[in-house]
Image (cartoon, rainbow, N blue to C red):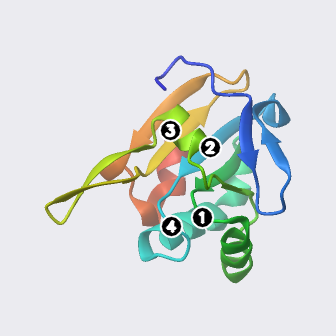
Amino acid sequence: MNIGDKAPEILGKDEQGREIRLSDYRGRKLVLYFYPKDNTSGCTSEACSLRDHFAELQGAGYEVVGVSKDTAESHQKFKEKHELPFPLIADVDRTLMEAMGAWGEKNMYGRKTMGTIRTTFVINEEGIIEQILSGRQIKTKEHASQILTL
């Protein structure tokens, strides 16, 4: 997916098994962020940054949805442990990740592996991708601030 593309309508199912659709957020901007794994240091920092600034994000017209290939059960525990106020999509079959380009080859410690590429899409009120942050562009501890200054 690229800037200017329409995001997919069906995003997936959250930790409660509820289907999340792009149209659920019509009229609001959506921060759709992809992260590698629940309860890892970088992913926890990123989620907590978004949690800590959630009111500011909402005040600026944003909603937040996280996505990883973890299970709904893992997401429930992660959400409860860190008191996350936004849904987490359990994309266990990587459908959304692959459609959005957030799954691919990564270089980890000199080894090439396939995995989740940390990526954030800022989607406007009409469902069009306005901004994309990816990989090292994302500062996990300051991610909410990065979004608020776009």
Q: Which of marks 1 and 2 is nearer the N terminus?
A: 2
Q: Mark 3 to mark 4: distance in Å?
A: 16 Å
Q: Do the residues labelled 3 and 4 touch (CB within 8 Å)?
A: no
Q: Percent from the top left, x then y, of residue 41? A: 44, 76
In the image, residue 133 above or below residue 118: above
Q: Earlier in the sequence, mark 3 or mark 1?
A: 1
Judging from the image, what secondary structure is the residue with disc 1 in?
loop
Residue drawn 72% across and 21% down? 126
Judging from the image, what secondary structure is the residue with disc 2 in?
strand
Residue drawn 50% across and 57% down? 35
Query: Residue reaching furthest left?
Result: 110
From the image, state whether disc 4 or disc 2 is nearer to you. Answer: 4
Disc on res. 70: 1
Q: Percent from the top left, x then y, of residue 16? A: 84, 62
Q: Which image quadrant for residue 75?
A: bottom right
Number of callouts: 4
Q: Mark 4 to mark 2: distance in Å?
A: 18 Å
Classify mark 1: residues with Cα within 10 Å, few (<14), some (14-19) or many (20+): many
Q: Percent from the top left, x then y, of residue 60? A: 69, 42
In the image, residue 137 above or below residue 28: below
Disc on res. 37: 4
Q: Can residue 59 be seen in this view?
A: no
